Structures are given as C-alpha cells and as structure tokens.
Image: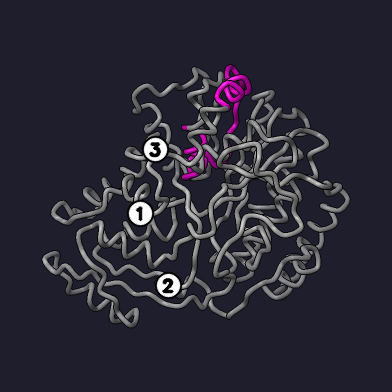
Amino acid sequence: MSFMAEKILYELICLLWHKTKNMQTPHLPTFIGTHITKRKESLFHADIQAFSAALQAEIADKSVLVIGGAGTIGSSFIKALLPFRPARLWVVDINENALTELVRDLRSTADMYIPTDFKSYPVNFGESVFEKILAAAGNFDIVAHFAAHKHVRSEKDIFAIEAMLENNVFRTYRLLEMLTKSPPKHFFCVSTDKAANPVNVMGASKKLMEETVMAFAPLFPVTTARFANVAFSNGSLLAGFVERMAKRQPLAAPSDIKRYFVSPTESGQLCLIACVLGKTGEIFYPKLPKNSQKTFSEIADAFVKEAGYQSCICKTEIAAKEKAAIWQEKDKNYPVYYFASDTSGEKEEEEFFTAVEKINENTFQALGFISPQTFPTFAEIQSKLAQIKVLFLHENVEKTDIIAAFKAILPYFGHIETGKNLDEKM
C-alpha cells in the first residue's frame, strides 16, 4: 500500500462519524511522509526490491498464519506479504470488527492478490478453538504473531499487568508449544524497542517474550523485531490527535519524550523481511539516526499547522478543555496542552539494542539485526515464567512484587516508578 492510501479511513471517520465536513483536517498519508518520517517512500523500499527474489522463493505457494492480523502492524504485514502470492492465508484476531474491515479492505483494493484459501477467524489465540483451528490446518510454512498488549498504560495495577503478561508471555509460550507438533519454516513474533533496557513492565514483558521465543530456536526458525512507534497506529497518541480534532477537543502531548517513528507500511515490510529472511534467533530493527527522534509536542504542532491552524498553548488541561468548548473554526488558534512527562515507565528516549548485544548492520540497507550469542534453555524459561506466574496465585500480590520478580530475572530491567499512570492524562 502506498503512503497516499494509508490511513484514509481516519479522514472518513472525521467526515462521517463526527460530521466535520467544513473543518480542515490534515491529509494523513502525506503528513506521515513529510512531517514525521521525513521520507517520500518507504525506508525499506530498496531492501524489498533487492531481496524480492528471495522473498518470492520463501512465500510463493506457501501457507501463512497471521495472529493479531487486524491491527495496524499485522494488517500492514499482510499487505506486504500478499504481492508474493502465498497459496493460503489464515488470519486470527480477537477484534471482530477490525478483522471484518481488513477483509473488506483487501477485497476492495485494486490489483490485490488474495489466495483462494483465505480465511479470517475472530478468536483469541489463547482459546481452545484456536488449537482446533491449528489442528485442522495441518501445517503452516509461515506463522507471524502480532497479538500483544503494547501500551505502557497497561501497568496501571495488578489486574492490568496480569492481563498483559498473559497475552504477551504466557499465551505466546503456549502458542510455541502448539507449533512444535507441526513446526513452521518461519516463526515471527513482534517485539518493541521498549524491550531494550526496559523501564516499564510492558517492555519487560516483551523482553521476556523475546527470551521465550528464542528458547524454541533449536526446534524451528524463530525471529523477532524491535522497532519504533508506528505513526497513527491504532490506539496510538497520534491516532488520538485525529480523534481529538474531529471531536473538536484539545490535543495533549508530552513535550520531553522523544521517539523514533516508522509508517504503517514500513512496519509491515520490516516484519516481513525479519520473518522470512531472518536467520533463527535474530532480532531486527530499523537503522534510524538518533537525531530522527521527535517529541510528541513537535508532531502535534506540525499536525495542527497541516490542518490550517496554529497551536494555542494552554497552561493546564482545564484551560485547554475550556478553550476547546468555545472554539470556532474561524479561530485559527487551536487549543493544545503540553506537559513534562511524570508517569511511570517512560524513558526520555528509546533504543533498539543494548551495549552487550552483537549487532549486524551490513546485510541490509535499512535494517540491522542483533545476532544471537546463546539461546535460553527451556529449563531457564520455565523457571522464569514460574517465578512470575506463582505471584498471581496470591490474593495480596501487588505491582511492586511483579517489578521485584522481573528485576530478579531480567538483569537490565530498571523500572521507572512515579506513582502516576497514563490513564490520569488526557
């Protein structure tokens, strides 16, 4: 999918859901290219072209299972995959509405190849019916796993943490166990840059997930990828900018947090290359210069400008909401509220790898990868998972107990705790 096609749904939401036909809204595909990534074409375009024959050889006429395929990254992976003409594509996602829209999107796109054996299942990959689906399928050549809790806000309390760990770690382990019955030729599980020297429970859960995946490397090829924020991905702060402006609400963003960004198309292509061309145990990442990181307030200002307004900086949330309540479109000063981050688990800047990891940046033009040095054993992983899981058997378990357990099993986990979480912010 081209940049010009990306995120057009958001503009339709603005026009149809919120009836703001007379209000200017940024053209988001262009905005992603010019204001956020600063790229007119995909970062990975050259690598996709250079390795096209290798991708074709591994994908054409093969069977593919995509878990969490209706989300931003999963659906972008599918759109990157289909031009290489797999024979079978089954997609699983717990979000029935998003899965339905994915099918409609694919079937409504000109020149989109869709295999005859194409099925979508609105089920949780942790349910027993999913195991029946796997058994009925027989074997998949490629399994790509995108289902995950991805927000730092998911560590707000013990209940949110348990749900996140169940999804990111324990279900992933059970999935890998299921796949040992009919091992795929390629297994990919998406990670995050927050897994490098994690400071939040979400990042720690993804680091533990990485180790869990690597334990299966002796049984079948496994790879993963850490990468930047995906611009305007579902549920992201930037996607929230669209919703806020469509509803004529103020934009709110931290002014001191810097992040790397890739487009939705780039996220799918990165994962495709990592999944299909990576060697077992490799962790991929985009080669982005440190000075390409942006603050959310910078992006908000550019977003407001692209919409035809200028930022009216309010000193408090209340002031911003009051300004928005009386704001008229003829007023070119749009209310925004910027603040210094004071919530738990937020780094000022992210990173893709640590000082002790062995990196390779010579194979691909725009991707690097971390080469495996050793693989965790099943005994080591089972011990770590047991230390976490046993805590939830106690009624009085607290967040501090989980953090302490993670610090014991992940040497580079340095949790940042402020006593506040993102649910307390606009």
Which label's residue is closer to the chain start, 3 or 2? 3
Disc 2: which residue: 255
Q: Is residue 349 left or right of residue 340?
A: right
Provide the residue span drawn in magenta: 51-79
Q: Does the magenta-highlighted stretch encompass residue 231?
A: no
Query: Are the two marked residues, 1 and 2, in contact with CB atoms closer than 8 angstroms?
Result: no
SS class of the residue under badge 1?
helix
Q: Specify whether residue 122 is in view.
A: no
In the depicted structure, whether residue 391 falls above or below residue 134: below
Between 143 and 339, the residue placed more toward the observer is: 339
Name the side, left or right, on which 351 lies relative to 114. right
Check disc 2 and report its element: helix, strand or loop. loop
Amino acid tagged 1 = His
Residue 410 placement (x, y as % from top left): 77, 63
The percent coordinates of residue 209 (x first, y second) are 70, 51
Residue furthest out toward the left: 330
Residue type, label 2: Ser
- Label number found at residue 101: 3
Label 3 element class: helix
Q: Is residue 304 left or right of residue 211?
A: left
Q: Residue at x 59, y 70 (%)?
A: 345
User: Of the residues under marks 3 and 1, which one precedes in the sequence?
Assistant: 1
Q: Quadrant of residue 25?
A: bottom left
CA separation, marks 3 and 1? 28 Å
- Residue 371 can be seen in this image: yes
Task: Write down the residue under mark 1.
Answer: 35
Picture layout, residue 397 above or below residue 220? below
First reached walking from the N terminus: tag 1 or tag 2: 1
Q: Quadrant of residue 39?
A: top left
